[in-house]
Amino acid sequence: MKIELSDLEDFARGAAFLGTGGGGDPYIGRLLATHAIKEFGTPKIIDPEDLADDALVFAIAMLGAPTVLVEKAACGDDIDLAIDKLSERLGRRPDALIPIEIGGINSTIPIVASARSGIPLVNADGMGRAFPEIQMVTFNVYGYPPAPLSIVDEHLNAVVVDAKDAKTAEDLVRSVAIQMGLSVMTANYPISGSVVKKYAVKHTLTLALEIGRAISRGRAQGEPVDSLLAYLGSTEYYKHCKILFDGKIVDIKRETTKGFSVGHCRIDPLTGDGDSMEIIFQNENLVAKVKDKLLAMVPDLVCVVDRETAEPIPVEALRYGQRVKIIGASVPPVMRTPEAIKIFGPRAFGFEEDYVPIENISM
Amino acid sequence: MKIELSDLEDFARGAAFLGTGGGGDPYIGRLLATHAIKEFGTPKIIDPEDLADDALVFAIAMLGAPTVLVEKAACGDDIDLAIDKLSERLGRRPDALIPIEIGGINSTIPIVASARSGIPLVNADGMGRAFPEIQMVTFNVYGYPPAPLSIVDEHLNAVVVDAKDAKTAEDLVRSVAIQMGLSVMTANYPISGSVVKKYAVKHTLTLALEIGRAISRGRAQGEPVDSLLAYLGSTEYYKHCKILFDGKIVDIKRETTKGFSVGHCRIDPLTGDGDSMEIIFQNENLVAKVKDKLLAMVPDLVCVVDRETAEPIPVEALRYGQRVKIIGASVPPVMRTPEAIKIFGPRAFGFEEDYVPIENISM
């Protein structure tokens, strides 16, 4: 596949949908990618299957609270330096880059990194969605931790972390990111081509682009949410999808704490009659519930979109009075194994419920 | 000079005196050094003048709140790894090690590092005393910042920091140290032999040992505080020395906050009549005052010693009812220039007073 300048709007919108509320303003990500492609050319995107088994692959991401990401934009030198510092640590430059998540700004930062560096970008990612913590990645689920990794701020201060386990890596990265002002570039998960081929969520760059295109097509035809659902239903990963709620936002509580944007949002039915839906988020939307029943839960997708335009609404843009549809969707099988649910199922986020796949929940 | 097993008690006690309340329990440092010398042999101590101009020198230190240092002891592998990680970052191993400060446990950690690694130790340090923050070092005062540096915890998690300036390095190091549990090993200030020769405070290993010996001699003769003062008066650095107060501790407030042990201590005259002295500390004792008059202030030394035995009392060992003498002493000229006072004079610690050398203050 290719991502051209003319694809960036659809791609960023599709990635914002898969970001399930997290990952920052897709408009910022799109601006960064536009700038990088204009200056450095279209990045080379390769299929996971094209990687040599012993190829070295780095994940590239921006890390911080989306509320802060919106206010700062990467300058580019920080992205290059993150790659350089991890390369220096490993004594070897990467053969390819991969998005750590296919959500929000972190789907476009790797495009910027690939365009600037000339290092190919793999059409895959480590989540098939977005998650707030650096250990919540398929590579880690299956035994490949995030460190060694590098963290770079906009002043080009750099930190390289070697951690014994993923939780320690997350704790150290979070402390450093908070100290650096909660908007840092990180190169992490130095993994081999064979690990990517086994455990990455594949072809998600293509999926993000096609989700964005489905919304655009739907807008032209007057039914963007229907078009979006029809496309999701046709995919292997997101095929179990449905509208969980249709209403207007009546309450929103959001705070930036311990390096995350956490809170909840209440949505009333448009008619005013009937039960409300509550969505709880930590950077990303985690669960959608009505009364005490969870209608969708991590790692399945809970997405808030504008009910007329299907525009994905990130957590930091949720506002009182917005009329929205809440869409739930399944995730790839590699994200739903017992090992995976342990790392990013509902209990990993402090909920008391066991994971139930969205297709098994009656509404 | 040499530091033999039989010297360690005097050396650690002298270093505790120069630690001015900071740097942790000298007994712990002594145990660590004893263990290392028994296992690996006496470290080779070299004169600063013996360094080649282009020699590479690392400072080695434990970093954290002394209240925590007391409870954890370095295992040794963490010290080795700190040296390894900074060497890896620089592509070169050090030709010599140097204590960052000659106070408390950080005067013996470099002995451990040198004994274990076989890398010679320079008879000098970066403070001629102890200070709580990593930028408060003569090398930094004169333009040689602390990063790149490495930080390693007892589980051998490692972080390497490249910071644009010393304040950023301190902030990042402090965040990481707090996350790691406030007791970490760090290799820092990679500097050349010529910088050591120009800006280090020289022969302070010898001075620490001789201060300890003066206390021991005094104990044998029945006047340890007098013996200590007589020796200090004979040195080039600490010659302006005096007893600032003689009394008993009646109030002590101490808390561990933001990675430091901060607080103050009030001492009443033994007779109960007359004004009290107050000592304010941040890991180290910073100022000694009576009413509103500062009788000694950083960077000059403020030391609390047992009034009978001259045993230096670290901040974390201050107790109600202790009978103590407070000793003030000058520091080397390299620590008293306007550039130096800007980094570790009273205003650098938030006091409103300008620095006045102890010899210019009437009591």
Image: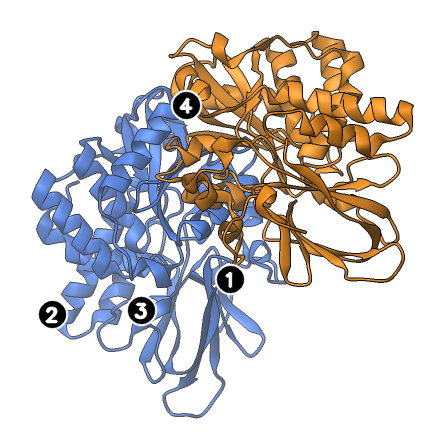
Chain colours: A orange, B blue
Q: Is residue A237 visible?
A: yes
Measuring from the top left, give residue B153's x and y in whole percent: 34, 45
Label 2 lies in what chain? B
Q: Which residue is mark 1?
A: B360
| Number of numbered callouts drawn | 4
Q: Is residue A216 above or below residue B70?
A: above
Specify whether A61 is left or right of B230.
right
Disc nearer the start of the sequence (2/3): 2
- Crowding at label 4, few (<14), some or many (≥20) Cα neighbours within 10 Å? many
Q: Which residue is mark 4?
A: A89
Which mark's residue is nearer the viewer, 2 or 3?
A: 3
Disc 1 + disc 3, Cβ < 8 Å = no
Q: Residue at x 45, y 52 (%)?
A: B178
Which mark's residue is nearer the viewer, 4 or 2?
A: 4
Measuring from the top left, give residue A242's x and y in whole percent: 71, 40
Label 3 lies in what chain? B
Q: Which residue is mark 3?
A: B313
Label 1 lies in what chain? B
Q: Nearer the viewer, residue B289 or B283?
A: B283
- Crowding at label 2, few (<14), some or many (≥20) Cα neighbours within 10 Å? few
Q: Are marks 2 and 3 on the same chain?
A: yes
Q: Residue at x 16, y 38 (%)?
A: B43
**Which amino acid type corresponds to the residue marked 4 in the rendered image?**
Arg
Q: Residue at x 25, y 59 (%)?
A: B26
Secondary structure of the residue carrying tag 3 is loop
Q: Which residue is mark 2?
A: B220
**Which amino acid type corresponds to the residue marked 1 in the rendered image?**
Asn
Q: Nearer the viewer, residue A232 or A102?
A: A232
The span from disc 4 to disc 3 (Cα, nearest Å) is 43 Å
Specify whether B234 is left or right of B243.
left
